[in-house]
Image (spheres, rainbow, N blue to C red):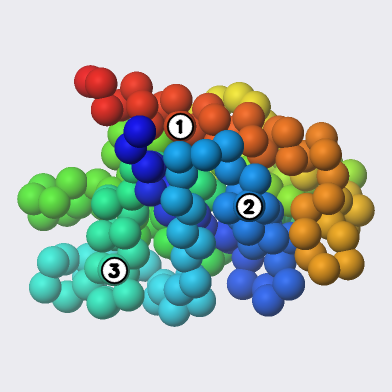
Amino acid sequence: MTTSRIFALSGSLRADSHNTRLLRAAQKFNPGGQEIEIYEGLREIPPYDYDLDTLETRPAVVTDLRHRVREADGLLIATPEFNYSVPGVLKNALDWLSTDWTRTEGVPLARKPVAVMGAAPTNFGTVRAQLALRQMLVCTDSDVVVKPEVIVFRSQDRFDDQGNLADEGTIELLQALLTALQEKIDAGRTR
């Protein structure tokens, strides 16, 4: 069995982020066969700048991000919700991952299997943020997992005092999402 490499992005910069905790839970509870790497460099990504988006002028941190996404078998995104949408830092990173003006290297997100989830302390969780994120991923021609939807509402009640995901229903949904992502990865390998 081939181990799949999953690159995981948390859309939150908070040190104690529920979305980063959700990614750690994905590492812990993954159904097997997946190596999940959580990205730690989102804070360093500069604002998207078309004038710098070439092979020669791209910031090194962006080149590294693009390489890591390109090399991964799949992408797992955990998004909080700000102002009924995704946080600006996540949108900015996706902007850097959605281009190939040189037409030489390919768009890192194109046909990339992607799973989306999110946690928020509100009663609606990240419903609107995930909708906005899914719309962006349509534009990038990503291969998005449609179901199950992992919308962790009242997220402060889903984690224990040590920050571990403790809600059995959420753990089951998370495992089902990772299984669905693996199915997309496997389907792409047979094409």
In terms of secondary structure, where does tag 2 sit?
helix
Residue under numbered circle 2: 28
In terms of depth relative to the viewer, which is nearer, 176 or 18?
Answer: 176
Label 2 crowd bin: few (<14), some (14–19), many (20+), radius 10 Å: some
Q: Amino acid at mark 1?
A: Gln
Residue 64 got which mark? 3
Marks 2/1: CA–CA distance: 16 Å
Picture layout, residue 83 above or below residue 16: above
Marks 3/1: CA–CA distance: 24 Å
Q: Position of residue 48 (x, y in %)?
A: 37, 67
Residue 103 got which mark? none
* Residue for point 25% across, 21% down: 190
Q: Position of residue 191 (x, y in %)?
A: 23, 20
Picture layout, residue 119 above or below residue 66: above
Q: Position of residue 7 (x, y in %)?
A: 43, 53
Earlier sequence position, callout 3 versus callout 1: 3
